[in-house]
Image (tube, helix red, strand yellow):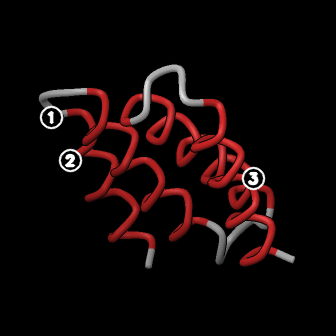
Amino acid sequence: MCQTGILANKLGQQSINDISKFSVRVFAQVVATGHMQGDAIVSSDYAIKVVNILYYHDEQAAINEIILINLFTG
């Protein structure tokens, strides 16, 4: 599990755009959640950044992402 997070972080550093960089960070933080629950919050923050980049100035898309995160994280 730790090796997966390290590899994901290396991939994130090599990302060619913000969408791929933040998407990899979402994955890396999800993997790290096994070690520390606070990483789930960081993962959701990165997921919202990805949505904000994909749907620039679309407040409803960001709200929908927050709702989905709350559904899955309780």
**Callout 1: helix, strand or loop?**
loop
The crowd level at tag 1 (other Cα within 10 Å; few <14, some 14-19, many 20+) is few
**Callout 3: helix, strand or loop?**
helix
Amino acid carrying label 1: it is Gln
Separation (CA) of disc 1 from disc 3? 24 Å
Q: Residue furthest right?
A: 74
Quadrant containing the C terminus in the rendered view: bottom right
| Mark 1, residue position | 14
What residue do we see at 52% from left, 34% from top? 49
Q: Do residues under tags 3 and 2 come within 8 Å of each other at their CB atoms?
A: no
The residue closer to the viewer here, 37 or 22, is 22
First of labels 3, 2 by sequence position: 2
Which mark, by number, is residue 11? 2
Separation (CA) of disc 2 from disc 1? 5 Å
The crowd level at tag 2 (other Cα within 10 Å; few <14, some 14-19, many 20+) is some
**Callout 2: helix, strand or loop?**
helix
Whole-percent x and y of residue 3?
Answer: 34, 70
Mark nearer the viewer, 3 or 2 = 3
